[in-house]
């Protein structure tokens, strides 16, 4: 199962780059839109040595990653601007940009590891790296063992790692998809 696309915040790309597994996104998505602000400000500022890994993934031939600058596309800017300004009142600028782009481009999925801000993005399907790994396992794109390895690599580097196992996160993801009414769209 490959979804048409998602809009990506910085943190999830950085976490996957640190685990050397940006390729996981190619298993689920045909394209990943990265807002210009997220790419130019947040990724450059926070990715440190992994910026080059992300940059190479964005600019390789056949890449699913596309950096989009709303200020160079008047229709996207007009459609995104109001939601971005509205969301900035309650969430960070990266997630605000993602919500504006998702709305303007009619892409219902936002991928981000900043799950504390998801409560202000409930009009979208919000997926963390744990959710993406769960979907990859569900659709048999990777084994549970491979997903657990990626999960552990990322979790070990987080400032606030979870004490959950991958199995715990897998089960929580499936419950979350059902609770939020996303199972049909996600093809589960």
Image: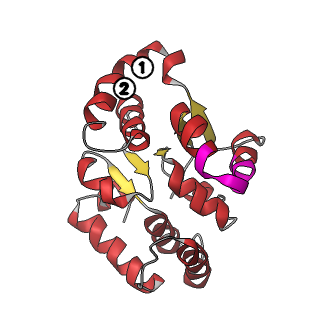
**What is the distance, in whole Å, between disc 2 and disc 1 at their CAs?**
5 Å
79 left or right of 153 in image? left
Q: Which mark is residue 120?
A: none
Say if the magenta span includes residue 66.
no
Residue 24 can be seen, yes or no: no
61 left or right of 117 in image? right
Residue 108 location (% of width, % of height): 36, 43
Q: Quadrant of the C terminus?
A: bottom left
Label 2 Cα neighbours within 10 Å, binned few <14 / some 14-19 / many ≥20: many
Residue 58 location (% of width, % of height): 69, 42
Q: Residue at x 33, y 76 (%)?
A: 172
Q: Residue at x 31, y 53 (%)?
A: 117
Residue 99 figure quarter = top left
The vertical placement of 85 against 25, above or below, is above
Looking at the image, the residue that sits furthest to the top is 74
Residue on which the image places disc 2:
80
Range drawn in magenta: 45-54
The vertical placement of 145 against 155, above or below, is below
Instruction: Check if mark 2's residue and mark 1's residue have beta carbons within 8 Å.
Output: yes
Q: Secondary structure at mark 1?
A: helix
Q: Secondary structure at mark 2?
A: helix
163 left or right of 66 in image? left
- Type of secondary structure dominating the magenta stretch: helix
Residue on which the image places disc 1:
77
Residue 41 location (% of width, % of height): 56, 37
Tell me the colour scheme of the image. secondary structure
Residue 138 can be seen, yes or no: yes
Q: Residue at x 74, y 39 (%)?
A: 59
Say if the magenta span includes residue 48.
yes
Residue 145 location (% of width, % of height): 59, 85
Q: Residue at x 54, y 76 (%)?
A: 151
Number of residue marks: 2
């Amino acid at each position: 199962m490959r979804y048409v696309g998602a809009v990506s915040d910085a943190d999830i790309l950085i976490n996957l780059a640190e685990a050397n597994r940006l390729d996981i996104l190619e298993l689920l998505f045909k394209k990943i839109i990265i807002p210009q602000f997220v790419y130019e400000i947040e990724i450059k500022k926070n990715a440190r040595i992994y910026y080059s890994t992300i940059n190479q993934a964005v600019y390789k031939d056949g890449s699913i990653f596309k950096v989009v600058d709303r200020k160079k596309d008047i229709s996207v800017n007009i459609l995104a601007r109001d939601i971005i300004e509205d969301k900035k009142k309650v969430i960070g600028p990266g997630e605000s940009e993602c919500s504006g782009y998702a709305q303007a481009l009619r892409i219902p999925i936002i991928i981000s590891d900043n799950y504390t801000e998801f409560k202000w993005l409930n009009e979208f399907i919000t997926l963390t790296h744990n959710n993406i790994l769960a979907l990859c396992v569900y659709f048999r794109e990777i084994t549970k063992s491979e997903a657990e390895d990626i999960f552990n690599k990322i979790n070990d580097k987080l400032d606030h790692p979870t004490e959950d196992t991958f199995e715990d996160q897998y089960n929580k993801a499936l419950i979350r998809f059902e609770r939020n009414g996303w199972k049909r769209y996600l093809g589960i």
